[in-house]
Amino acid sequence: GSTAGESDITNDRGGRTTFADAGTTAGTSDITNERGGRTSFRSGSTAGDSTITNKTGGRTTFAGTDTTAGSSHISNRTGGSTAFYWGSDAGSSHISNVGSGSTSFNDNSSADEARISNRFGGSTAFNDRSTAGDATVNNAFGGSTTFNGRSNAGGATINNVLGGNTAFNDRSNAGGATIDNVLGGSTAFNDHSSAGHADIANSRGGSTAFSGGSTADESTIFNGRGGRTTFADAGTTAGTSTIANKRGGSTAFSGGATADGASITNDRGGRTTFADAGTTAGTSTIVNERGGRTSFGRGSSAGEASIANSRGGSTYFGYQSSADGASISNSRGGRTYFGYQASADGAAISNSRGGTTAFGNGATAGGASITNTRGGSTTFAKGSDAGSATLANSKGGSTLFADGSMAESAQITNSSGGYTSLAGNAALGASTVTNNAGGALLIGGQANAAGATVINNAGGRVDISRTSAGASIGSLSGAGNVYLGGQALTVGALNRNETISGVISDGGVAGGTGGSLVKVGTGTLILDGVNTYTGGTAINGGTLEVGDASTPSASILGDVSVNSGGTLRGHGSVNGNVDNNGGMVWPGGSIGTLTVNGNYTQSPTGTLQIEVSPEVASQLKVSGTATLAGNLSLLYAPGTYSSQTYTLVSANTVNGTFSTVAGNAPAGSKYGVLYLSSAANLSVAPMVVAPTQATIYGAVASSALRESQRANDALLERLAGPCGVVAKAGGKDAGSSAGQTPDICARQGNGVWIQAQGTNTQVDGNHDAPDVTDRRFGFLTGLDHQWKGWTVGVAGGYSHADVLESGNGSKGTLDTLRIAGYGAKNLGAFTLAGTLGYAYDFASTTRSFGGLGSAKGSGNGQEVTAGLQGSRSWNLGSVVLTPRVGLRYAHLDGFGMDESGPTAQNLRVSNQSLESLQPYVGVTLDYPFVMRNSDRPASLQLRAGYAYETLNTGRNVSVTAADGTGFVIPGTVDSRGMLTAGVGAKLPIGKSASAYLRYDSVLHIDNVSAQSLQAGVEYRF
């Protein structure tokens, strides 16, 4: 309880003064420590109101709980120091560290409410678990404060000015401190330290730096008027802090740092930057407004951030940076820009109310989703592209592709006042553009869409009037209108079949007349509208159909040139002249009339295609003069023809004749062309025209029946394994050697199995039917169960077949769902097995007539399958021989169908009812062996078999033509005998599973051969 009162105390050259015990105080004394002199406070003593000066080598220490510096004034001059230990505190003292003078807080000591000043190299250090409490710490002119270990800044106020600095190291924490960095003052967070929930302000050159895995945690950071915060190194993060950059303040992330879940605001010139690969905005929320800006550069990423730009705020993506999966909104003058080699990747970007997104040289929209609405826009400048992005423009929103930009494979939708425009030599690439009601595609300059797909729905608009030399669109369809101005529109380069039911006309945003249409490619373009463009039509490739069968009111205005490789057909009208310059003119499409309100001229290399049925023929109706030459091609529909005359061409005047008349009428048929002054007529004598290329129906049914028997065989073969003899290890059987062969029985216990198979079957044609290729793949899977000495099971599967006829383009597909039950029982050395199954087939066929179109049909079928088999195994030394004999049955019913297509060749196909009954024999030779590190056998197998078809192999199919005439179409007859050979291998997997691979071949002894590969897995339990 003693006191130093008002004494003057000097500790010099090792001199020491100690204050100990509670109540002991330095009073108002004046204490000086130098040259090794020391003053110690401990055990609850206090420095009171004393003045303590530590000069070079002088030192003051405080140790122990309740030991305090009180309200003393402590001055640590060059070389002097003060230290606090073990729960002591600085009370409300004033501590000044000058030169190399220093103060340290150690263990769990506290600066309490002290006022600490570090100047001219003076320093304060907080170590261990010490705290700055509620102290006020001022660092200036090179003065510094450091926090180390687990120390924290508590609720202190720390001011760094004029080169003063504070550093947090070694997982230290800023707690709830208030930190102000100004005029070159700085704070650094290093070595996994944390800003806690501190309030940090940087201005006028003040700065805060995070590195070495440190975090801003839940702090609030303000950067203003040149203030700056930096995050560097991988693992360094902004945590969930709140960061505001204003009036030139900035935040920078680099070296792999992340903004994590921070909230960042850039306002009035505030800025945030991200640089280097691995640096990311994380899941932060970033707001840029009134000149605020966020920049990504050198491989950095926006991560999953939410970024909002408004009122002049902006986001910039620079060299090789990425928007990743960020959500970016631009409104009221907000802007996002992607520069050299930057990518929007998978970002979601919205532009509204004057907000914009721009892509510059080398940038790409990647796979972003971009929405432009209410005046928002996206612009692609030279060298940039839209990648595979999805862009939606509505309510005044727009996308602009400027000179040298590319839409690549983007998906673009325009609706309700939204539009996409192209300028300069921009290109839509392989993109798809969809115009819904109120949406528009505007093509100008030298831009093109030759590789693009444009779907112009009702109320949509395509406008090429501002182009300098016309435009090309790869695929154009829909009920929207198309405006040409005075330009040429080239369509069809993508070789697709499309329909335009809207109106194609002159005019558009640039006005103009004399617009023209050029058809290229191999596809068919149907025009079902009343088209008014005045510059004419050129058909250079594929088919242009003016009006399908349901829209005979369709028309085009102006002259038409049908050039080599082109076809004009349809049920509508051409209000102009038609020149057939080596192409084909085909009235109708199905049987119908094409009207030419002008003159028709056919060159010597041109062809007029006319389709004829027993009741009516197509007709070319010309209001002016028809000048005939070249070829007349007659396509007779199947049916029974009576003696009659058809009008093929009607005109005001008919000049010339066809140089050749050819068709598919049967040999010996009598028909001729009669030329009148106003008509060209076809006279036909009675005849019957049979369908062509109709053998595909029988080929598909044969494929189904072959698969039925293959499924029977697959199930029965599984039940013929070498069981009964070798099922008992070491056993014997009459007529066999000692059963020492490793057990390879496939039916021990319960189990599941799956088998995948691919088969390629070749069938040589006969009976005037072509060769057939049948490619099939599929699987069977099943569940085995042991029941009262029986192996019983259920199996299911799926298969797909592609059936192709050689030389005629006809083809079919077959998809089959199958279910079957099976069972087997050992009767001594013999095994009896059986199966019963059901399958449902989905079949489709296509008969191709080249450029005339295809007749297509689809139908369903049902199958019932059954089989019975006996087998026996013998041990022959190191191998096991298993012969088997059996009978397998399949019944198929169905595949009736009504064909549809653009020609009169369509048929009604009757149901087919087919059966197959095949006695068969087979033999397998297994070589079992035990592999190293396994107590279960593997095996190699040779196999052979022969089956013979005993029932009808004919594939006659009944069909009916449109006029009711019935026909029987003979198909290819498969060989009755089938000889097979194959090899296989089976390997154990663990204790309960095995896998196998097999190859089989149907040998080419007659007209059927096949190659098959099977792979399967079995699991026993």
Image (cartoon, rainbow, N blue to C red):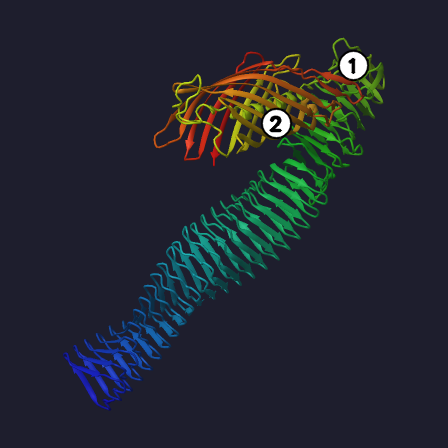
Report the amino acid beneath label 2: Leu
Q: Mark 2 points at which residue?
A: 836
Q: Which mark is residue 688?
A: 1
Quadrant of the rendered structure where residue 116 is?
bottom left
Element assignment for label 1 = strand
Left or right: residue 643 compared with residue 260: right
Q: Viewer-proximal residue, 877 or 207?
A: 877
The answer, for residue 653, to whether it is visible in the render is yes
Q: Position of residue 132 (x, y in %)?
A: 34, 74
Q: Position of residue 51 (x, y in %)?
A: 26, 85
Left or right: residue 59 compared with residue 572: left
Residue at left 68%, top 50%?
A: 417
Above or below, comparing residue 230 to residue 109 in the picture: above
Q: Dividing the image into 4 quarters, which one contains the N terminus?
A: bottom left
Element assignment for label 2 = strand
Task: Estimate the spatial distance between the alpha carbons at disc 2 and disc 1, rounded to whole Å.
Answer: 45 Å
Report the amino acid beneath label 1: Val
Q: How many discs appear?
A: 2
Above or below, comparing residue 443 to residue 157 in the picture: above
Taking the view exactly as shown, the residue that stands out farthest to the top is: 668
2 or 1: mark nearer the eye: 2
Q: Where is residue 742 in the image (x, y as percent from the top left)?
A: 40, 26
Q: Compare marks 2 and 1 and give the one earlier in the sequence.
A: 1
Quadrant of the rendered structure where residue 865 is?
top right
Q: Position of residue 159 (x, y in %)?
A: 37, 73
